[in-house]
Amino acid sequence: MEPNHPTPRRRQAHTIAHLKHPHIVRVLDFDVQDDTPFLVMDYAVGVTLRQRHPKGSILPLPTIISYVKQVAEALQYAHDTEGKVQFMFNQTWQSEMAKNNLSHDRTRFG
């Protein structure tokens, strides 16, 4: 991934990195190493849902509703935030490209 090229994967990582919600594990950084993209995320303390509810467990309806509400809130937040973050990313990228082109032109012609 070129650092100055806004690929879809880079835009997605940038969007995810700006999400701050109690039901979304925070992304601290993202990069590519040896053509493999990766995310650096906060450590999620606690147990997994599989540990909390072993395979075959029958969950009470209030527990299921609680989980669905948490996921729905996180998805709604991500959906509402995505457009704002994409706009910020595009503005920042365009600004950086303009600066790079300007400095490149000065070096080449000046």
Image (cartoon, grey):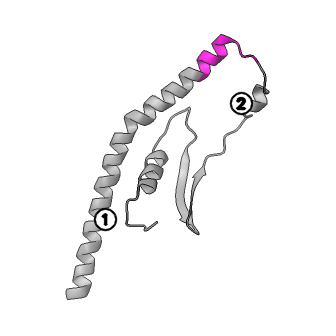
Image spot of residue 37 (x, y percent): 55, 59
Question: Which residue is tagged 2?
Answer: 49
What amino acid type should be assigned to the residue bearing mark 1?
Answer: Glu
Going from N to C along the chain, the mark reached first, 2 or 1, is 2
Q: Please, what secondary structure does the residue beneath circle 2 have? A: helix
Left or right: where 101 falls relative to 89: left
**Label 2 amino acid?**
Leu
* Residue in the image at 38% along x and 67% along y: 4
Q: Is mark 1 on a helix, strand or loop?
A: helix
How many other residues sit within 10 Å of disc 1, few (<14), some (14-19) or many (≥20)?
A: few
Horizontally, is 107 left or right of 15 in the view?
left
Residue at the extreme left? 109
Q: Bin the neighbour count of mark 2 within 10 Å (Cα to Cα): few under 14, some 14-19, many 20 and up.
A: few
In percent of the image, x 54 and y 48: which residue is there? 27
User: The C terminus is located in which quarter?
Assistant: bottom left
Which label sits on residue 73? none
Quarter of the rendering containing residue 78: top left
How many numbered callouts?
2
Magenta stretch: dominant secondary structure: helix
Q: Return the x and y of residue 42 as percentages of the image width and height.
A: 61, 46
| Residue closest to the eye, 36 or 41 | 36
Q: Position of residue 40 (x, y in %)?
A: 59, 53
From which residue to which does the magenta span run?
58-67
Give yes or no for contact between labels 2 and 1 (Cβ–Cβ under 8 Å). Answer: no
Say whether residue 65 is magenta.
yes
Residue 35 shows up from this direction: yes
Name the disc covering residue 96, or none.
1
Q: Is residue 57 or residue 3 the one in the foreground? A: 57
Q: Is residue 58 above or below residue 27?
A: above
